[in-house]
Image: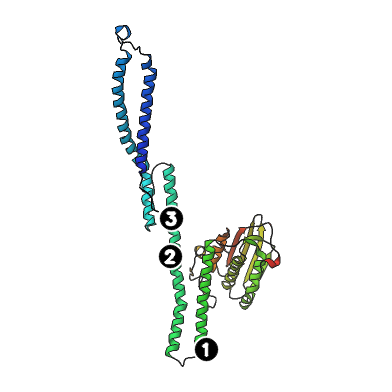
Amino acid sequence: MTRRPGLSARLKLTLSYAGFLAVAGALLLTVVWMFLLRYVPDNPQGLLGISPNRYLLVRTFFPAAAVAMGFLLVFGLVGGWILAGRMLAPLTQITDAARMAGNGSLSHRIRMKGRHDEFRDLADVFDTMLEQLESHVGEQQRFAANASHELRTPLAISRTLLDVAHKDPTRDRGELIERLQAANTRAIDLTEALLLLSRSDRGHVSRESVDLSLVAEEAAETLLPLAEQRGITLDVTGGATGTGGSAELLLRMVTNLVQNAIVHNLPAGGTVTVHTQAHGDTSVLRVENTGRALPPELLPTLTEPFQRGTERARADEHAGVGLGLAIVHSIVRAHDGTLDLVSRPAGGLLVTVRLPGTPSVPSPGGTR
Protein backbone atom coordinates (compact mmCIF):
# COMPACT_ATOMS: atom_id res chain seq x y z
CA MET A 1 0.00 0.00 0.00
CA THR A 2 1.45 3.36 -1.10
CA ARG A 3 1.43 6.09 1.53
CA ARG A 4 2.59 9.68 1.44
CA PRO A 5 5.91 10.30 3.23
CA GLY A 6 5.64 11.71 6.72
CA LEU A 7 7.62 12.34 9.87
CA SER A 8 9.16 9.37 11.60
CA ALA A 9 7.88 8.27 14.98
CA ARG A 10 11.26 9.15 16.52
CA LEU A 11 11.13 12.70 15.16
CA LYS A 12 7.53 13.11 16.32
CA LEU A 13 8.46 11.97 19.82
CA THR A 14 11.49 14.27 19.82
CA LEU A 15 9.41 17.30 18.86
CA SER A 16 6.84 16.30 21.47
CA TYR A 17 9.50 16.07 24.20
CA ALA A 18 11.08 19.37 23.18
CA GLY A 19 7.72 21.12 22.90
CA PHE A 20 6.62 19.84 26.30
CA LEU A 21 9.87 20.99 27.90
CA ALA A 22 9.60 24.42 26.25
CA VAL A 23 6.00 24.85 27.40
CA ALA A 24 6.94 23.78 30.92
CA GLY A 25 9.79 26.32 30.96
CA ALA A 26 7.55 29.09 29.65
CA LEU A 27 4.98 28.33 32.34
CA LEU A 28 7.67 28.43 35.00
CA LEU A 29 8.93 31.82 33.82
CA THR A 30 5.36 33.11 33.69
CA VAL A 31 4.83 32.04 37.28
CA VAL A 32 8.02 33.82 38.31
CA TRP A 33 6.86 36.96 36.55
CA MET A 34 3.38 36.90 38.00
CA PHE A 35 4.23 36.04 41.59
CA LEU A 36 7.58 37.74 42.00
CA LEU A 37 8.13 40.71 39.74
CA ARG A 38 4.62 42.03 40.12
CA TYR A 39 5.33 42.81 43.78
CA VAL A 40 8.56 44.70 43.09
CA PRO A 41 7.99 48.49 43.28
CA ASP A 42 8.05 50.26 39.96
CA ASN A 43 10.02 53.17 41.34
CA PRO A 44 12.81 54.69 39.22
CA GLN A 45 14.94 55.05 42.39
CA GLY A 46 14.07 51.67 43.76
CA LEU A 47 13.01 50.95 47.31
CA LEU A 48 14.75 53.60 49.57
CA GLY A 49 17.20 54.10 46.73
CA ILE A 50 18.81 50.74 47.51
CA SER A 51 16.59 47.88 46.24
CA PRO A 52 16.38 47.32 42.48
CA ASN A 53 13.15 48.38 40.87
CA ARG A 54 10.96 46.43 38.43
CA TYR A 55 12.49 48.13 35.40
CA LEU A 56 15.99 46.92 36.25
CA LEU A 57 14.79 43.43 37.11
CA VAL A 58 12.87 43.12 33.86
CA ARG A 59 15.92 44.18 31.83
CA THR A 60 17.96 41.60 33.68
CA PHE A 61 15.31 38.84 33.75
CA PHE A 62 14.17 38.71 30.13
CA PRO A 63 17.59 38.18 28.48
CA ALA A 64 18.35 35.43 30.98
CA ALA A 65 14.88 33.91 30.40
CA ALA A 66 15.42 33.95 26.65
CA VAL A 67 18.77 32.15 27.06
CA ALA A 68 17.15 29.61 29.39
CA MET A 69 14.31 29.00 26.91
CA GLY A 70 16.81 28.49 24.10
CA PHE A 71 18.78 26.06 26.24
CA LEU A 72 15.62 24.17 27.16
CA LEU A 73 14.64 23.91 23.50
CA VAL A 74 18.04 22.57 22.42
CA PHE A 75 18.21 20.29 25.42
CA GLY A 76 14.70 19.00 24.69
CA LEU A 77 15.54 18.28 21.05
CA VAL A 78 18.81 16.46 21.77
CA GLY A 79 17.54 14.66 24.85
CA GLY A 80 14.23 13.84 23.19
CA TRP A 81 16.02 12.37 20.16
CA ILE A 82 18.15 10.14 22.39
CA LEU A 83 15.26 9.08 24.62
CA ALA A 84 12.99 8.40 21.64
CA GLY A 85 15.69 6.24 20.08
CA ARG A 86 16.03 4.20 23.25
CA MET A 87 12.28 3.85 23.62
CA LEU A 88 11.76 2.81 20.00
CA ALA A 89 14.71 0.40 19.81
CA PRO A 90 12.49 -2.64 20.65
CA LEU A 91 10.03 -1.54 17.99
CA THR A 92 12.88 -1.45 15.49
CA GLN A 93 13.73 -5.05 16.34
CA ILE A 94 10.13 -6.09 15.83
CA THR A 95 9.98 -4.21 12.50
CA ASP A 96 13.17 -5.93 11.28
CA ALA A 97 11.76 -9.32 12.24
CA ALA A 98 8.47 -8.57 10.47
CA ARG A 99 10.36 -7.46 7.36
CA MET A 100 12.38 -10.70 7.37
CA ALA A 101 9.17 -12.70 7.76
CA GLY A 102 7.64 -10.78 4.86
CA ASN A 103 10.64 -11.81 2.74
CA GLY A 104 10.03 -15.47 3.55
CA SER A 105 12.34 -16.04 6.52
CA LEU A 106 10.13 -17.49 9.25
CA SER A 107 12.92 -19.02 11.35
CA HIS A 108 14.05 -15.69 12.81
CA ARG A 109 13.00 -14.92 16.38
CA ILE A 110 13.24 -11.62 18.27
CA ARG A 111 13.79 -13.10 21.74
CA MET A 112 13.78 -9.63 23.27
CA LYS A 113 15.57 -9.38 26.59
CA GLY A 114 14.78 -7.12 29.50
CA ARG A 115 12.00 -6.68 31.97
CA HIS A 116 8.35 -7.15 31.23
CA ASP A 117 6.65 -4.26 29.44
CA GLU A 118 4.39 -3.58 26.45
CA PHE A 119 7.18 -3.98 23.89
CA ARG A 120 8.27 -7.30 25.41
CA ASP A 121 4.66 -8.49 25.27
CA LEU A 122 4.46 -7.53 21.61
CA ALA A 123 7.78 -9.25 20.84
CA ASP A 124 6.74 -12.45 22.63
CA VAL A 125 3.40 -12.52 20.81
CA PHE A 126 5.18 -11.93 17.51
CA ASP A 127 7.64 -14.77 18.21
CA THR A 128 4.73 -17.08 19.01
CA MET A 129 2.99 -16.08 15.79
CA LEU A 130 6.17 -16.74 13.78
CA GLU A 131 6.57 -20.14 15.41
CA GLN A 132 3.01 -21.15 14.61
CA LEU A 133 3.26 -19.75 11.10
CA GLU A 134 6.52 -21.58 10.44
CA SER A 135 5.01 -24.81 11.74
CA HIS A 136 1.89 -24.35 9.61
CA VAL A 137 3.85 -23.54 6.45
CA GLY A 138 6.18 -26.47 7.05
CA GLU A 139 3.22 -28.76 7.58
CA GLN A 140 1.59 -27.55 4.37
CA GLN A 141 4.83 -28.04 2.43
CA ARG A 142 5.25 -31.56 3.75
CA PHE A 143 1.61 -32.28 3.02
CA ALA A 144 1.93 -31.06 -0.57
CA ALA A 145 5.11 -33.08 -1.08
CA ASN A 146 3.56 -36.22 0.38
CA ALA A 147 0.36 -35.75 -1.59
CA SER A 148 2.35 -35.36 -4.81
CA HIS A 149 4.32 -38.48 -3.98
CA GLU A 150 1.19 -40.50 -3.21
CA LEU A 151 -0.56 -39.34 -6.39
CA ARG A 152 2.49 -40.08 -8.47
CA THR A 153 2.38 -43.78 -7.57
CA PRO A 154 -0.98 -44.70 -9.16
CA LEU A 155 -0.29 -42.42 -12.11
CA ALA A 156 3.09 -44.07 -12.68
CA ILE A 157 1.44 -47.49 -12.49
CA SER A 158 -1.15 -46.43 -15.04
CA ARG A 159 1.52 -45.14 -17.41
CA THR A 160 3.51 -48.35 -17.07
CA LEU A 161 0.46 -50.48 -17.81
CA LEU A 162 -0.38 -48.37 -20.85
CA ASP A 163 3.20 -48.68 -22.11
CA VAL A 164 3.02 -52.44 -21.69
CA ALA A 165 -0.27 -52.60 -23.57
CA HIS A 166 1.19 -50.45 -26.34
CA LYS A 167 4.35 -52.54 -26.73
CA ASP A 168 2.66 -55.94 -26.36
CA PRO A 169 -0.72 -55.96 -28.12
CA THR A 170 -1.07 -59.69 -27.45
CA ARG A 171 -1.07 -59.28 -23.68
CA ASP A 172 -4.26 -60.13 -21.78
CA ARG A 173 -6.27 -56.91 -21.88
CA GLY A 174 -8.64 -58.02 -19.16
CA GLU A 175 -5.82 -58.14 -16.61
CA LEU A 176 -4.49 -54.75 -17.78
CA ILE A 177 -7.93 -53.17 -17.54
CA GLU A 178 -8.43 -54.58 -14.05
CA ARG A 179 -5.08 -53.24 -12.84
CA LEU A 180 -5.71 -49.88 -14.50
CA GLN A 181 -9.08 -49.70 -12.80
CA ALA A 182 -7.47 -50.43 -9.42
CA ALA A 183 -4.81 -47.74 -9.95
CA ASN A 184 -7.41 -45.24 -11.13
CA THR A 185 -9.67 -46.00 -8.15
CA ARG A 186 -6.76 -45.43 -5.77
CA ALA A 187 -5.99 -42.07 -7.41
CA ILE A 188 -9.65 -41.01 -7.21
CA ASP A 189 -9.93 -42.08 -3.56
CA LEU A 190 -6.78 -40.16 -2.69
CA THR A 191 -7.99 -37.04 -4.51
CA GLU A 192 -11.36 -37.16 -2.73
CA ALA A 193 -9.61 -37.64 0.61
CA LEU A 194 -7.36 -34.66 -0.07
CA LEU A 195 -10.34 -32.48 -1.02
CA LEU A 196 -12.21 -33.53 2.10
CA LEU A 197 -9.18 -32.88 4.29
CA SER A 198 -8.72 -29.43 2.73
CA ARG A 199 -12.39 -28.62 3.22
CA SER A 200 -12.42 -29.60 6.88
CA ASP A 201 -9.09 -27.84 7.53
CA ARG A 202 -10.60 -24.57 6.30
CA GLY A 203 -13.37 -24.94 8.88
CA HIS A 204 -16.08 -24.18 6.30
CA VAL A 205 -18.67 -26.66 7.55
CA SER A 206 -22.41 -26.39 7.58
CA ARG A 207 -24.15 -26.35 10.94
CA GLU A 208 -27.17 -28.55 11.55
CA SER A 209 -28.42 -30.76 14.33
CA VAL A 210 -26.95 -34.26 14.07
CA ASP A 211 -27.49 -37.39 16.19
CA LEU A 212 -24.17 -39.22 16.52
CA SER A 213 -25.94 -42.46 17.44
CA LEU A 214 -27.72 -42.50 14.09
CA VAL A 215 -24.51 -41.61 12.30
CA ALA A 216 -22.75 -44.49 14.07
CA GLU A 217 -25.51 -46.92 13.08
CA GLU A 218 -25.30 -45.80 9.46
CA ALA A 219 -21.52 -46.18 9.38
CA ALA A 220 -21.74 -49.62 11.01
CA GLU A 221 -24.41 -50.74 8.54
CA THR A 222 -22.20 -49.68 5.64
CA LEU A 223 -19.12 -51.47 6.99
CA LEU A 224 -20.86 -54.58 8.32
CA PRO A 225 -19.98 -56.68 5.21
CA LEU A 226 -16.30 -55.80 5.67
CA ALA A 227 -16.47 -56.77 9.34
CA GLU A 228 -18.18 -60.08 8.55
CA GLN A 229 -15.63 -60.81 5.84
CA ARG A 230 -12.84 -60.44 8.38
CA GLY A 231 -14.62 -62.24 11.18
CA ILE A 232 -14.96 -59.08 13.29
CA THR A 233 -17.88 -58.53 15.65
CA LEU A 234 -19.24 -54.99 15.24
CA ASP A 235 -21.45 -53.54 17.99
CA VAL A 236 -23.08 -50.11 18.27
CA THR A 237 -24.30 -49.04 21.71
CA GLY A 238 -25.46 -45.89 23.46
CA GLY A 239 -28.36 -43.52 23.21
CA ALA A 240 -29.21 -40.37 21.32
CA THR A 241 -26.26 -37.98 21.28
CA GLY A 242 -26.89 -34.62 19.69
CA THR A 243 -24.28 -32.29 18.29
CA GLY A 244 -24.07 -29.54 15.72
CA GLY A 245 -22.16 -29.71 12.45
CA SER A 246 -22.05 -31.21 9.00
CA ALA A 247 -23.82 -34.57 8.80
CA GLU A 248 -21.71 -35.52 5.77
CA LEU A 249 -18.39 -34.79 7.49
CA LEU A 250 -19.45 -36.42 10.76
CA LEU A 251 -20.51 -39.54 8.87
CA ARG A 252 -17.12 -39.60 7.16
CA MET A 253 -15.43 -39.18 10.54
CA VAL A 254 -17.27 -42.14 12.10
CA THR A 255 -16.85 -44.25 8.96
CA ASN A 256 -13.11 -43.70 8.96
CA LEU A 257 -12.86 -44.59 12.64
CA VAL A 258 -14.90 -47.78 12.29
CA GLN A 259 -13.10 -48.85 9.11
CA ASN A 260 -9.75 -48.22 10.74
CA ALA A 261 -10.86 -50.28 13.76
CA ILE A 262 -11.92 -53.16 11.50
CA VAL A 263 -8.87 -53.18 9.28
CA HIS A 264 -6.33 -52.83 12.12
CA ASN A 265 -7.67 -55.69 14.20
CA LEU A 266 -7.02 -59.33 14.94
CA PRO A 267 -6.89 -61.70 11.97
CA ALA A 268 -10.07 -63.33 13.25
CA GLY A 269 -12.34 -63.18 16.26
CA GLY A 270 -11.76 -59.49 16.91
CA THR A 271 -14.32 -56.96 18.11
CA VAL A 272 -15.19 -53.33 17.38
CA THR A 273 -17.43 -51.39 19.75
CA VAL A 274 -18.92 -48.00 18.87
CA HIS A 275 -20.51 -46.16 21.78
CA THR A 276 -22.23 -42.77 21.84
CA GLN A 277 -23.09 -40.88 24.99
CA ALA A 278 -24.04 -37.37 26.08
CA HIS A 279 -22.26 -35.83 29.08
CA GLY A 280 -23.88 -32.50 29.88
CA ASP A 281 -22.85 -30.08 27.15
CA THR A 282 -20.49 -32.60 25.54
CA SER A 283 -21.27 -35.37 23.06
CA VAL A 284 -18.92 -38.34 23.25
CA LEU A 285 -18.18 -40.96 20.60
CA ARG A 286 -15.95 -43.92 21.51
CA VAL A 287 -14.61 -46.47 19.04
CA GLU A 288 -12.76 -49.36 20.66
CA ASN A 289 -11.19 -52.33 18.91
CA THR A 290 -9.02 -55.33 19.64
CA GLY A 291 -5.73 -55.88 17.88
CA ARG A 292 -2.00 -55.83 18.39
CA ALA A 293 -0.47 -53.76 21.15
CA LEU A 294 0.56 -50.29 20.00
CA PRO A 295 3.71 -48.65 21.38
CA PRO A 296 3.00 -45.28 23.06
CA GLU A 297 5.43 -43.42 20.79
CA LEU A 298 3.36 -44.43 17.76
CA LEU A 299 0.13 -42.80 18.96
CA PRO A 300 1.08 -39.14 18.19
CA THR A 301 1.85 -40.08 14.57
CA LEU A 302 -1.48 -41.74 13.87
CA THR A 303 -3.23 -38.46 13.04
CA GLU A 304 -0.43 -37.14 10.82
CA PRO A 305 -1.14 -37.27 7.06
CA PHE A 306 0.67 -39.99 5.11
CA GLN A 307 2.46 -41.27 8.22
CA ARG A 308 2.10 -45.00 7.63
CA GLY A 309 4.74 -46.58 9.78
CA THR A 310 5.63 -50.25 9.80
CA GLU A 311 3.02 -50.89 12.45
CA ARG A 312 0.34 -49.20 10.35
CA ALA A 313 1.10 -50.31 6.81
CA ARG A 314 -0.98 -53.04 5.25
CA ALA A 315 -0.53 -54.91 2.02
CA ASP A 316 -4.15 -55.78 1.25
CA GLU A 317 -6.91 -53.95 -0.59
CA HIS A 318 -7.47 -51.68 2.40
CA ALA A 319 -3.92 -50.35 2.57
CA GLY A 320 -5.21 -46.79 2.33
CA VAL A 321 -3.15 -43.65 1.87
CA GLY A 322 -2.49 -42.69 5.48
CA LEU A 323 -5.24 -40.08 5.57
CA GLY A 324 -7.96 -41.87 7.56
CA LEU A 325 -7.19 -40.60 11.05
CA ALA A 326 -5.77 -37.38 9.65
CA ILE A 327 -9.19 -36.64 8.13
CA VAL A 328 -10.86 -37.60 11.42
CA HIS A 329 -8.60 -35.21 13.32
CA SER A 330 -9.29 -32.41 10.85
CA ILE A 331 -13.06 -32.94 11.00
CA VAL A 332 -13.01 -32.97 14.80
CA ARG A 333 -11.08 -29.68 14.88
CA ALA A 334 -13.47 -28.13 12.36
CA HIS A 335 -16.32 -28.98 14.77
CA ASP A 336 -14.50 -27.50 17.79
CA GLY A 337 -13.98 -30.92 19.34
CA THR A 338 -11.12 -33.00 20.70
CA LEU A 339 -9.68 -36.36 19.65
CA ASP A 340 -7.96 -38.71 22.11
CA LEU A 341 -6.18 -41.93 21.20
CA VAL A 342 -5.26 -44.42 23.92
CA SER A 343 -3.56 -47.78 23.50
CA ARG A 344 -5.48 -50.61 25.20
CA PRO A 345 -3.41 -52.76 27.59
CA ALA A 346 -4.78 -55.92 25.95
CA GLY A 347 -4.05 -54.62 22.47
CA GLY A 348 -5.92 -52.40 20.07
CA LEU A 349 -6.95 -48.79 20.32
CA LEU A 350 -9.53 -46.67 22.11
CA VAL A 351 -10.50 -43.52 20.21
CA THR A 352 -12.59 -40.89 22.00
CA VAL A 353 -14.16 -37.95 20.17
CA ARG A 354 -15.70 -35.13 22.20
CA LEU A 355 -17.87 -32.59 20.42
CA PRO A 356 -20.05 -29.71 21.65
CA GLY A 357 -23.48 -31.08 22.45
CA THR A 358 -26.91 -29.74 21.56
CA PRO A 359 -30.05 -29.90 23.71
CA SER A 360 -32.07 -31.62 21.03
CA VAL A 361 -31.42 -34.14 18.29
CA PRO A 362 -33.12 -34.61 14.92
CA SER A 363 -35.57 -37.28 14.00
CA PRO A 364 -34.22 -40.60 12.67
CA GLY A 365 -34.62 -39.39 9.12
CA GLY A 366 -32.61 -36.24 9.71
CA THR A 367 -29.14 -37.73 9.22
CA ARG A 368 -29.79 -40.38 6.61
The amino acid pointed to by label 3 is Glu
CA separation, marks 3 and 2? 15 Å
Tell me, yes or no, if residue 315 can be seen here: no
Q: Quadrant of the C terminus?
A: bottom right
Q: Which residue is mark 1?
A: 174
Q: Quadrant of the N terminus?
A: bottom left
Q: Tell me, for residue 131, which label it has, or none.
A: 3
Horizontally, is 26 left or right of 148 in the view? left
| In-front residue for pair 211/29 | 29
Residue at 43% over, 88% down: 166
CA separation, marks 1 and 3? 53 Å
Residue 360: quarter of image = bottom right
Horizontally, is 323 left or right of 287 in the view? left
Q: Which residue is mark 2?
A: 141
Residue at 52% over, 69% down: 195
Give the mark, 3 or 2, whose residue is nearer the N terminus: 3
Secondary structure of the residue carrying tag 1 is helix
Q: Is residue 272 above or below residue 103?
A: below
Residue at 42% over, 54% down: 130
| In-front residue for pair 255/9 | 9
The x, y position of residue 324, in whole percent, is 54, 69
Mark 3 crowdedness (10 Å alpha carbons): few <14, some 14-19, many ≥20: some
| In-front residue for pair 23/43 | 43
